[in-house]
Image (cartoon, rainbow, N blue to C red):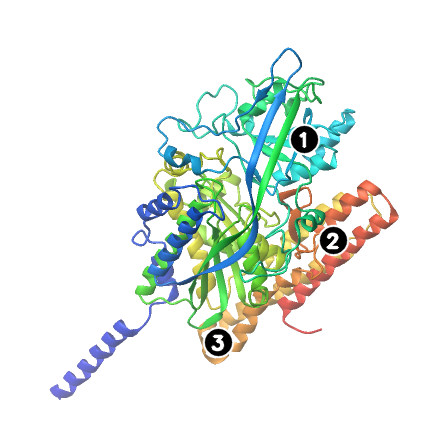
Amino acid sequence: MMVGKIITTTIAIATTLSFFFISTPPKSYYHSQFISPSLSDNASISHHLFTLTRRPHLAGSPANAEAASYVLSTLSSNNIKSHLSEYAVLLTYPDSRSLTLIRPFPESPTTFNLQQEVYKGDPYADVADQVEPTFHAYAKSGTVKGLVAYVNYGRVEDYAMLKEMGINVSDAIVLARYGKIYRGDIIENAYDAGAIGVLIYTDRKDYGGGGGNTKWFPDDKWMPPSGVQVGTVFNGAGDPTTPGWPSTIEGCERLSVDEVEKGGDVPLIPSLPISGADGEEIIRSIGGVVADDDWQGDKDAPLYRIGPGPGIVDLSYKAKEVISTIQNVIGIIEGAEEPDRFVILGNHRDAWTFGAVDPNSGTAALLEVAERLGKLQKQGWKPRRTIIFCNWDAEEYGLVGSTEWVEENREMLASKVVAYLNVDIAVAGPGFQASATPQLDQLIIEATKQVQDPDNSSQTVYESWAQASNYPEIGRLGGGGSDYAAFVQHIGVPAIDISFGNGYPVYHSMYDDFVWMSNFGDPMFRRHAAAASIWGLVALRLADEVILSFNYDSYVNELQKSAEDLDTQLLDKSITLLPLFKSIEKMKTAAIQINGELEEIKENKGWAFMWKNQPWKLRKMNDRLMMAERALTDREGLSGRPWYKHLIYGPSKHNDYGSKSFPGIDDAVEIAKSLNTEDSWHSVQHEIWRVSRAITQASLVLRGELT
């Protein structure tokens, strides 16, 4: 009898021990581990950022190739199979440039040195000469001379005001300030107004701390007077010579430079970015009408007049055009159960100068996510779906690396990607920011509820975020400002973009370095760690949960709101929005239906039972959730902008950074208001029908049933 009890007890203990050692913890356990302090490493993040930003690393440079090797090595050392994906693309660099201001006699001309000054004690002084001279990528080469006119921010509405005032800037060189719209659109708007050249400066009012401020970097966060914001002026996406197809390294079809110019996405007049100090000196040479108060600078600035003249500017710029090799770094953790479903995390690596904020705060966060997932793999975690890390190159030139990769892998990505999770700038300061396609709103909110606020340990990121804007405000991904564009706007993949901070004064200047970050952006690197936690947690949930955490209720609400705004805009026009409202109602019905199906499964049998006994049903449901976004694209794309396929979210025609709902309708309305012809308003109605059909298609995908 005793022997039997001993044997029974021994078997029970053995069974318990076997379960303890062999059974795998639930995915939620690993998700909690991922955001635990034991896996987070602020010092490692700081080290990554310091290493990546030791030298300027512009796309196509040896320093950027070294940075690619560092990212590749870090991913590989964390058990992430990695490789380089290379492309041969057109990049431009400054060959020569000059700028002279000629004032009325007897004042002598001023030739600007166009230099960003090294400050006393600058630890990067020994490599400052590796910073490219200030320029605009893809700017038109040429020499122009003319009266200078001040045009505020260079927006369409600014030129409309000049027209009302009877001021003509034809054959003038215009001076615009950065701050409201994309620099490429500043130049395009100037060309449309008849200008022959453009200077864009960094106004102290927007970037220097305002009137009375006498401190700037390195003593404060503000842009120094000699600081210059450089950047691209290309209005497209990807390599300008291969629109719509990849610039493969082994050779490919290319457009000529003349063909690129005729395509309309590169400027046709020369331009230069200049400093706030140089901009103010030119302002002093302008006479004529005094600008309105909202066109003026800060209280210590000179009086802003519009001109043109009497100051004359002599501007010369010559570009070097080079077919350069760029390198995307791709790392893959293969999924254990659904390896053909991809969750992609993306950030770019190339920078105009040192890039501590833009983009390498994001690169450091990407490597932190990779290191934490490497530790989870050692604990036995394997993702259900494949996780892919993408470190893009040449983003600054026009989203080049990500666009070429998406174009090369278009069909695979369109059929297999669950979501794309972008972090360009991880940290520029305090305050969480998020943008997304609406079905991912709730997932972001839930992730922020699990992560401690890096600036207030007594609350979560969600609580701080909600307090700042009454309710968490989530933007949309219609702008062309970062690498989500190819995924959302070209192939229709659900996506997010997150960061801490909303803009920073030394943007795209040589002062965006490790010193600025460690003094002003994130001294303790807690915001970096929090960004990595939110980013990785969203990725883990999308990669691991049996059913995708997509909520289309939010999408329906967004569509309804956008349609109502459009209805108000077109109230006095003979346009009907009935097809649009009907299609949104269909989308609402489809969302209610799939939500009901999900609840029924959860209440009755649960995901685990269904995955074991009817896996095809869950797969079908996930496909419906994943593919509905694809249905919102149209193969013909936007009218005049065929690369942009998404009919709900796309960039504004006159501000590439601006996000527009129904961009095709918006473009058509703008044209119709200008022409006011029957045909132009008929085009508006056509675009409304196009959007309505796309939403109806998305509804059918969500329902998962044929008509």
Q: Position of residue 53 (x, y in %)?
A: 40, 43
Q: Earlier in the sequence, mark 3 or mark 1?
A: 1
Dot 1 amino acid type: Val
Q: In which quarter of the image is residue 180?
A: top right
For image coordinates 57% across by 63% down, the residue present is 408
Placement of the N terminus among the 4 image quadrants: bottom left
Relative to 292, 524 lies left or right: left
Q: Which of marks 2 and 3 is nearer the N terminus?
A: 3
For image coordinates 54% across by 26% down, the residue present is 276
Relative to 423, 38 lies left or right: left
Placement of the C terminus among the 4 image quadrants: bottom right
Residue picked out by circle 3 = 610
Between marks 1 and 2, how big is the CA–CA gap?
33 Å
Between residues 454 and 76, which one lies in front from this camera angle?
76
Above or below — where is 286 with respect to 407? above
Dot 3 amino acid type: Met
SS for callout 1: strand
Disc ID at residue 639: 2
Q: Residue furthest right?
A: 678
Q: Quadrant of residue 22?
A: bottom left
Q: Position of residue 183 (x, y in %)?
A: 61, 38
Q: Position of residue 364 (x, y in %)?
A: 40, 48
Relative to 66, 485 lies left or right: right
Q: Where is residue 489 in the image (x, y as percent from the top left)?
A: 62, 55
Residue picked out by circle 1 = 144
Between residues 87 and 420, which one lies in front from this camera angle?
87
Between residues 96 and 605, which one lies in front from this camera angle?
96
Between marks 2 and 3, how big is the CA–CA gap?
45 Å
